[in-house]
Image (cartoon, grey):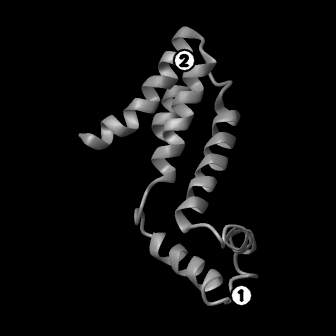
Amino acid sequence: MGYLIIVGTPVLFFYLAKFFHSRKLEIIGLSLLCILLGLRYEFGADYPAYYLVYNSINILGDDKYKYTEPAYYYLNVLFGSLSFNTMLFFIAIVTLTLFYSSIKNFNNRTLILLIF
């Protein structure tokens, strides 16, 4: 039940933004989603694997991931002086902003956000 409230709150802001034609409510809904995804900790099946890669690159100086996942490798190098969660927060902001900017012209974007 708590998960539905947490996920439903940003969706409610998107619905209200559409109803009231308010750009501010859209930004609030997008910000809440970014916070929700950016502040997750040890969530998901691949979290430990990506955390291990982050530590291997930034603590051990291992560059064996440079060619298998080059974009993720360079993100790790870029965020090496910051925390792993800061990098996840940045990835969430970029991903959700690009996703939302691509679907904002759909008529039923609330349904699309629920599916996502």
The residue tagged with tag 1: helix, strand or loop?
loop
Q: Position of residue 103 (x, y in %)?
A: 65, 32
Number of other residues with Cα within 10 Å of mark 2, as a class: few under 14, some 14 to 19, many 20 or more: some
Residue located at (64% from left, 25% from top): 106
Farthest top residue?
A: 20
Left or right of 56, for residue 37: left
Q: Earlier in the sequence, mark 1 or mark 2?
A: 2
Rendered position, 104 above or below 77? above
Q: In the rendering, which numbered label is found on residue 17?
A: 2
Residue located at (57% from left, 54% from top): 89
* Camera sees residue 18: yes
Q: Position of residue 19 (x, y in %)?
A: 52, 11
Rendered position, 89 above or below 106? below
Type of the residue with mark 1: Asp
The residue tagged with tag 2: helix, strand or loop?
helix
Residue located at (61% from left, 61% from top): 87
Q: Position of residue 31 (x, y in %)?
A: 55, 36
Q: Which residue is mark 1?
A: 63
Rendered position, 17 above or below 46? above
Rendered position, 42 above or below 64? above
Left or right of 91, for residue 6: left
Number of other residues with Cα within 10 Å of mark 1, as a class: few under 14, some 14 to 19, many 20 or more: few
Relative to the observer, which residue lies in front, 65 or 83?
83
Left or right of 116, for residue 71: right
Residue located at (40% from left, 62% from top): 43
